[in-house]
Image (cartoon, grey):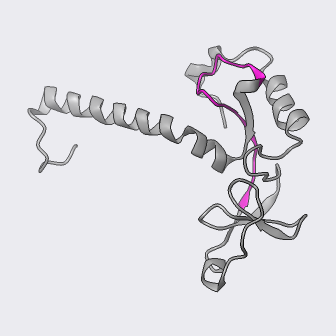
């Protein structure tokens, strides 16, 4: 994932080397949570299962062998291109210890960051609501936010 410009100063000068070491030296070019391979186009289902062509089997979102999809599930499969990123498990970009960093695919990275994103969403909503109260009067449940 690209680094936001306001967070760029939090990362060390050798971040690309650290990230490369985590993703390729330690993890071997696969997601450390589900096992999806870097820069590969894979078939996946909405529930997180994906087809591993090397082992010729479906895997779940934890990388374990999973059941094959039935006909209805198979119609919902799509192709995705996997790109690995180095994720901070504690969401602190200044904490670059190797035990805090994981090589994750896009899906696993988003799942890892979900609680943080929900908290940020709530803060944004509360801030917009407060600004609305200041300039538009009391917030009404019947009146949608502008």
- Please identify the quarter of the rendering in which residue 103 is found: top right
In the rendered image, residue 108, in percent from the top left (x then y), is placed at: 65, 47
The quarter of the picture where residue 3 lies is top right
The residue lying at 65 percent from left, 68 percent from top is 45
Q: Is residue 26 above or below residue 134?
A: below
Name of the residue lying farthest toward the left: 137
Q: Is residue 59 left or right of residue 53?
A: left
Point out the residue furthest to the bottom here: 71
Taking the spot 64% from the left edge, 60% from the top edge, the residue there is: 48
Residue appearing at x 82%, y 56% in the figure: 40
Q: Nearer the viewer, residue 8 or 72?
A: 72
Q: Main secondary structure of the magenta part?
A: loop
Quarter of the C terminus within the rendering? top left
Please report the residue visible at 11 percent of the width from the left and 43 percent of the height from the top: 140
The x, y position of residue 62, in whole percent, is 71, 53
Residue 86 in picture, x, y percent from top left = 73, 34
**Magenta includes 83?**
yes
Q: Position of residue 1 (x, y in %)?
A: 67, 37
Q: Which residues are magenta?
A: 80-98
- The correct choice, above or below, for 58 with respect to 142 in the image is below
């Amino acid at each position: 994932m690209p680094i936001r410009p306001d967070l760029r100063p939090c990362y060390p000068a050798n971040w690309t080397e650290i990230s490369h070491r985590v993703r390729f030296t330690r993890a071997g070019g696969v997601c450390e949570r589900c096992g999806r391979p870097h820069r590969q186009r894979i078939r996946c289902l909405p529930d997180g299962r994906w087809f591993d062509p090397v082992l010729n089997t479906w895997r779940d979102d934890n990388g374990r062998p999973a059941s094959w999809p039935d006909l209805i599930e198979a119609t919902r499969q799509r192709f995705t291109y996997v790109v690995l990123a180095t994720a901070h498990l504690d969401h602190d970009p200044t904490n670059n210890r190797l035990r805090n960093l994981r090589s994750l695919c896009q899906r696993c990275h988003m799942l890892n960051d979900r609680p943080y994103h929900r908290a940020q969403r709530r803060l944004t909503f509360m801030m917009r609501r407060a600004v609305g109260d200041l300039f538009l009067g009391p917030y009404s449940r019947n009146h949608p936010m502008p």
